[in-house]
Amino acid sequence: MKARIVTLPGDGVGPEVTAAAVAVLKTVATRYEHVFTFDEQQIGGAAIDATGEPLPAASLAACKRADAVLLGAVGGPKWSDPNAPVRPEQGLLALRSALGVYANLRPLQVHPALADLSPLKNEKLQNVDVLFVRELTGGAYFGAKTRTADTATDECKYTVAEIERVVRRAFELARARRRHLTSVDKANVLETSRLWRSTVQRLATDYPDVKVEHQLVDSMAMLLLTRPNAYDVVVTENLFGDILTDEAAALAGSLGLLPSASLSDGRRGLYEPIHGSAPDIAGTGAANPVGAILSAALLLRHSLQLETEALAIEAAVDQVLRDGPRSRDIGGTAGTDAVVAAVLAALDRHASCAIVSAGARACA
């Protein structure tokens, strides 16, 4: 397969973890005889410094031509003035909108070897396997905004069409998993949430094989910590999804472990670890590259339909999390390069695995 992948390293640790993901993708390309070409572009604070814009026209054009986009992180103290007319996050929001990537997938699993790092007792972490589906191009992040000396407003707006497309995606994902969908809203207070809930209820009739439940977002924040293994696919709006998935990351032990995929109706997607730019450790070689590497696996799965290769990366990461070395945020002492080297070595061993029935692996 031939594929063009645009990389947007961004700010802080973004360039470091993006380089790790690219190294893994290059190894996959060599091992499985693919041809991946990489086109590095600017976004975020680095782009503001270079061009005055958080998403230069050249970066957006390249992303629109690509088969997939791999992002590092944006933002940092240098550009943190809330009154600044141009901010790094504007570039990310503009990119999501321009690419039409409305469904943000954030898988959460708790690795047994890291369960002690979670603030929850181990028995609550058994069999935790949740896929969050966050609506990504609507809601308060994209609504009209006003600001005066003593007031401010952020419009939260949703259309039926925006809700339908992400909820249908969530139903389809639930149908391919354990057939349980939890929809999160604030329908007791917000009109947008009432529209959200009524839309989910209407679409549920098209998926009679999927069990549907509704949770208020404040209750869900508590339930994620008291019975996280009760959930399969969780779908929610933009702001709620942002908050809940960061909360859920604590269950896994570190923000540095979790990947994400932002998908449109086509194959092209935007892939990024869920952590931020971590400016306090940028340049120290201490960043955990696992979230970015697993985001590369999602890129292979969703944009390039290379399931075997995606599973090989995930198996390699699983081995490294189990046997080490581990980065400092998950109780180890290894730097970024050491973790990447271990993943590459494990990937070479796992690359000969063939996919057999029921998703099992048989290695030669």
Image (tube, rainbow, N blue to C red):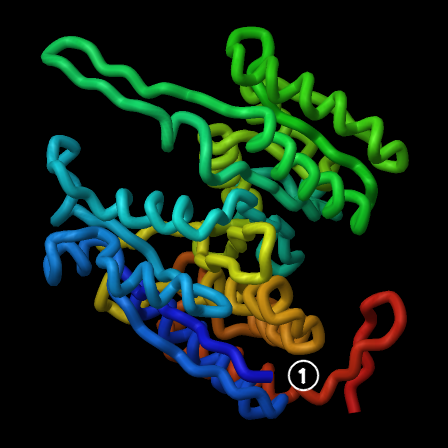
Q: Residues within 10 Å of mark 1 (few under 14, many from 20)?
A: many
Q: Amino acid at mark 1?
A: His
Query: In the shown orientation, is residue 19 left or right of residue 2?
Result: left
Q: Residue at x 51, y 56 (%)?
A: 259
Q: Nearer the viewer, residue 218 or 56?
A: 56
Picture quarter with the N terminus:
bottom right
Instruction: From the top left corner, tell me how far across and down residue 121 is, in percent.
Output: 63, 39
Q: Is residue 77 above or below residue 316?
A: above
Q: Is residue 134 above or below residue 184?
A: below
State the residue at coordinates (32%, 59%). 60
Left or right: where 108 falls relative to 180: left
Say which of 272 and 58 sits in front.
Answer: 58
> The C terminus is located in which quarter?
bottom right
Q: Position of residue 217 (x, y in %)?
A: 56, 22
- Judge by depth and name the residue closer to the eye, 196 or 261: 196
Picture coordinates of residue 132 (x, y %)? 61, 42
The front one of 61 and 106 is 61
Can residue 320 be spotted in the picture? yes
Whole-percent x, y for residue 167 in the image: 66, 35
Residue 237 vs 57, above or below: the answer is: above
Badge 1 is on which residue?
A: 350
The number of callouts visible is: 1
Which residue is drawn at the image coordinates 58% and 21% (left, top)?
A: 185
**Residue at x 58% of width, y 7% of height:** 188
Task: Tell me: 137 left or right of 83.
Answer: right
Helix, strand or loop at mark 1:
helix
Give the image quarter of residue 267. bottom right
